[in-house]
Amino acid sequence: MIKKLQLLTIFCLMSVFCFAQQAAGPEIFTFAEDMPKPVEGLKKVNEFILKNIQYPKQAVQLKVQGKVILGFVVSDKGELQNISVIKGIGGGCDEEAIRVLKLTKWNPGKQKGKPVHVRTNLPINFKL
């Protein structure tokens, strides 16, 4: 009886461990052999951001300037996921930086020739 209980306990623990491994999702790299890049290239995406940023009224009133640094994951399909503010400046600038970043298109990073999820950062400058 004790052996059966021990075997059942081990089986249950292994099942929980395996489920936790599957539920964790795909591996997210912080560095890949080929890092993700905007479809149009960095120069064009910077021009796009400058053209499409709408300086928030509150930031203008408060004379908020600076650099918002966004962190995000580029999926193996080139989709932006888990966008977060690493360094914000407030006044609505953080939210505006996220809004404009969501408008950009990215090519996924690659590891050993295969597309992978990669975490990366992008600074966006706000200057009055």
Image (tube, rainbow, N blue to C red):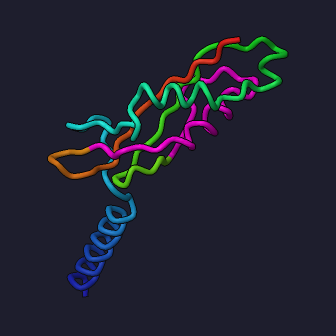
The quarter of the picture where the C terminus appears is: top right
Against 121, is 99 above or below?
below
Which image quarter: residue 20? bottom left
Quick one: 86 or 78, which is closer to the camera? 78
Against 110, is 33 above or below?
above
Relative placement, left or right, of 125 versus 33 is right
Residue sitting farthest toward the left:
112
Which image quarter: residue 98? top right
The quarter of the picture where the N terminus appears is: bottom left
Relative placement, left or right, of 11 versus 54 is left
Against 6, is 58 above or below?
above
Q: Is residue 31 magenta?
A: no
Residue 52 image point, x, y percent: 64, 32
Residue that appears at 42% across and 25% down: 43
Q: Which residues are magenta?
A: 82-109
Quick one: 60 or 118, which is closer to the camera? 60
Q: Is residue 106 magenta?
A: yes
Residue that appears at 50% across and 23% down: 123
Residue 64 image point, x, y percent: 73, 14
